[in-house]
Image: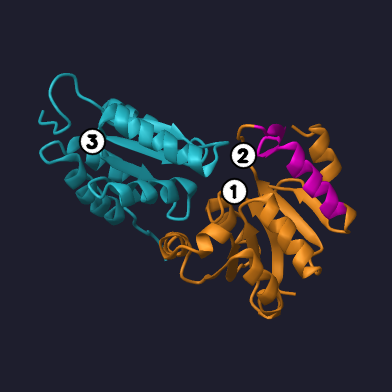
Amino acid sequence: MNDHTGGGPEKPRAIVVGHGEFAGGLVSAVGQICGMADKLVVLSMMGMTPEDIEGTIRDQLSRTGARVIFTDLPAGSATIAARRIVKDDPEIVLVSGVNLATLLDFVFNTSVSPTDAARAAAERGKASLIVVGR
Amino acid sequence: MAIHLYRIDDRLIHGQVVVGWGQPLNIRVLILVDDAVAASDWEKELYRMAVPPEMEVYFADVATAIREHAKYAGDPRPGLLITGDIESMYRLVRGVKAIGNVNLGGIHHRAGRSEKLRYIFLTPDEEQQLKQLEAAGVEVTAQDVPSARAVPLPEVLEGAAR
């Protein structure tokens, strides 16, 4: 497996953060489907100030070396915090509006860097939204 | 008056505001009153990008918001005014003298604050400011989302609803 986060034991490739138990639920589903939940770090922002949210994401990026942040809502506090982080470090990629299809595509795409994988996964996630019925 | 909610929320524009309150109240105008945000084009753009296209956002510092409040209130579109701290809302209410209700939506833990509700933490000074607002005739309640019960200030301060 080609992991661009470095040699040795594989590190998480991205942080997933959102409202309530959103991130934990989504990553749990990734684990159930393909057993690759360890590629993702789950963060919950319940009860945090905006400064705490930003600080926690920065800490996790630093600790894990991840360069990708997935958030749920464009209007969410996590997205606002992540955009501040990307402003300081444009090499980090933020994908807002993440869904399960996005994360599954991301964790399997180890042939490119995590940031490129995130861009490709976002397109897959958009395409996964379908409407059936009249 | 078209401003349906005066809210104190340290996250400013976020999911609970845009979706939680914005959808049921059909909010079309957000007035973000914050001295630091109003002074920064980057901060304004950050929050502008967080709202859906059907919502317009006004940015103002407290002094401007006091001057412009009649214009905001006269806008026929449903509006929501938000400050990030009690001090800003306190100054606004005292300057405008036409605000009858204030919603405590989210004031989270920081050093010096004690927990009153799951989403409300206050310093002694902040408690005093809220008491002064009520003493001036402003109804202050805590309610993070529309489906929750609006908790009256005395109950908030007792911490009994935690």
* Chain painted in cyan in the figure: A
Q: In front here: B117 or A120?
A: B117
Answer yes or no: do the residues labelled 1 and 2 have beta carbons within 8 Å?
yes
Q: In front here: B96 or B55?
A: B96
What secondary structure is marked by label 1?
A: loop
- Residue, x 71% and y 37% (percent of image)? B123
- Residue, x 59% and y 56% (percent of image)? B17
Determine whether, in the image, residue B93 is placed left or right of residue B88. Answer: right
Which amino acid type is marked by label 1?
Asp
Question: Whole-percent x and y of residue A81?
Answer: 43, 46
- Residue, x 42% and y 64% (percent of image)? B45
* Chain painted in orange in the figure: B
Residue at mark 3: A107
Specify which label sits upstream in the sequence, 1 or 2.
1
Question: Whole-percent x and y of residue B50?
Answer: 45, 59
What secondary structure is marked by label 3?
A: helix
Determine whether, in the image, residue B58 is placed left or right of residue A24. Answer: right
State the separation of the CA atoms marked 3 and 2.
34 Å
Q: Residues within 10 Å of mark 1 (few under 14, many from 20)?
A: many
In the image, which is nearer the foreground, mark 3 or mark 1?
Answer: 1
Residue B76 sits in quarter = bottom right
Residue at mark 2: B108
State the separation of the CA atoms marked 1 and 2.
7 Å
Are both tags, 1 and 2, on one chain? yes
Residue at mark 1: B10
Residue B111 sits in quarter = top right
